[in-house]
Amino acid sequence: MADAGSPVDAGTPVDAGAPFDATTPSDAQVADATSASATDASGSIDASADVVQPVPDAGTVASSEAGTGVPMGPTFANWPMPNPVSSGLPNPSSYDTSVSGVVLDEVTGLMWQQTEIASGNVTTLQQAAAYCSALNLGNFTDWRLPSRIEVWSIQDFMTSSPALDPVFGALPTGPQGNVAPWTSTQGLGDFTYGGVQFGDNGVLSVDSTLGEDATGGGSIRCVRGSTDPPSPHYTVQNGTVFDHGTKLTWQEGYDPTTSLPNGVANYCASLTLAGGGWRAPSIKELESIVDNTRVGPSIDPVFQMPAETVNDTDNQAFYSGTAYAPPPPGEYWWYLNFVAGFTGTGQNTGPFEPTPGVGPLEVRCVK
């Protein structure tokens, strides 16, 4: 189990159970929010830079932390990706709540604030980060905003409303119901899919630049734990890619054959590459290979990908083996579009078209 870290002094404590008021942050909150800011050549702290970045050319890399002045969580998982116990998949979720107000994920080693807080009038990433920096919970003071992949790690795709284990309690609601937690992960330019939503659907990609989804409302759930990246990250050998962080082995290539979602499992089970033993990945496992520092595609170039086309931005979408939790059972399935790393659902009883005009969706297996 990964080391969740040791407590450090992060400034004035804040109430872990009350909505955060960002209108008059304390000096300690401001200091904590800017202590990890980007510096210019003279060594001066710049915490006022624009959070939104321009879209880079397709396939290029951009820093996801430039200009935010916010402590960044990991881009990639350096721990096994938990799957819901009822899914029957490897790395079943397991939580320890022996410390009041804290949930320890026994698979990832991350510690979570148990209660998700309505973010009130928080309007910037820096304000959301200030709340976590000043949080004193469970005698720990080194809390921070989670990254996108960390938030994904506690999703429970076998349930909905909310798509979370009951140990995390009820969720706050926004003006129109669902809320999405702030994350330290920023999308690139127009692709601001930096967060996820726990509400009705659970595994929906949302806009963390605003700390909310399309329906409005936002929330904060802080985390603590290692931010070390996998090193090395990938090893490519004989048509496979081994992820040293999650310990998953991926198919380096893909099958571009069009089929219904329930055909994905059959394809993977019949794959003889590297001795066989392949299966369809869960939507969370697919998320673990998203590279938020890239677009078009948002994945490391060690993986083979179809070329993005001008009139069909969904030709880089891949099936998962995860069914959409709300009824009817098995009617809709989750996919992940690697153009910018966002999720969607498609129907299983007819031509698989998540959105009008979608081209064939690919399959990449895991073991």
Image: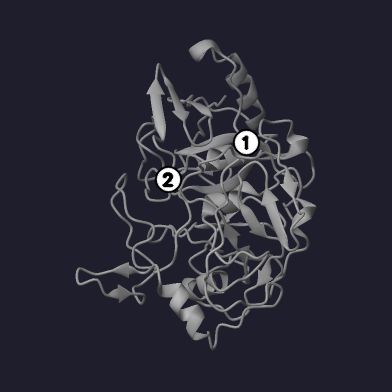
Q: Where is residue 177 in the image (x, y as percent from the top left)?
A: 72, 68
Label 2 amino acid?
Answer: Asp
Which residue is label 1 attached to? 282
Above or below, 31 relative to 208: below
Left or right of 52? Residue 334 is right
Q: In which quarter of the image is residue 83?
A: top right
Left or right of 344? Residue 242 is left
Colour scheme of this structure image? one colour
Q: Position of residue 48 (x, y in %)?
A: 35, 77
Which residue is label 2 attached to? 291
Q: Is mark 1 on a helix, strand or loop?
A: loop
Q: Which residue is drawn at 71% across and 46% down?
A: 156
Label 1 amino acid?
Answer: Ser
Dot 2, how many residues are within 10 Å of its Cα: few (below 14), some (14-19), or many (20+)? many
Q: Position of residue 90 (x, y in %)?
A: 66, 30
Q: Residue at x 52, y 71 (%)?
A: 10
Dot 1, how many residues are within 10 Å of its Cα: few (below 14), some (14-19), or many (20+)? many
The Cα atoms of the two marked residues, 1 and 2, are separated by 17 Å
Q: Quadrant of the C terminus?
A: top right
Left or right of 234? Residue 280 is right
Q: Position of residue 269 (x, y in %)?
A: 62, 18
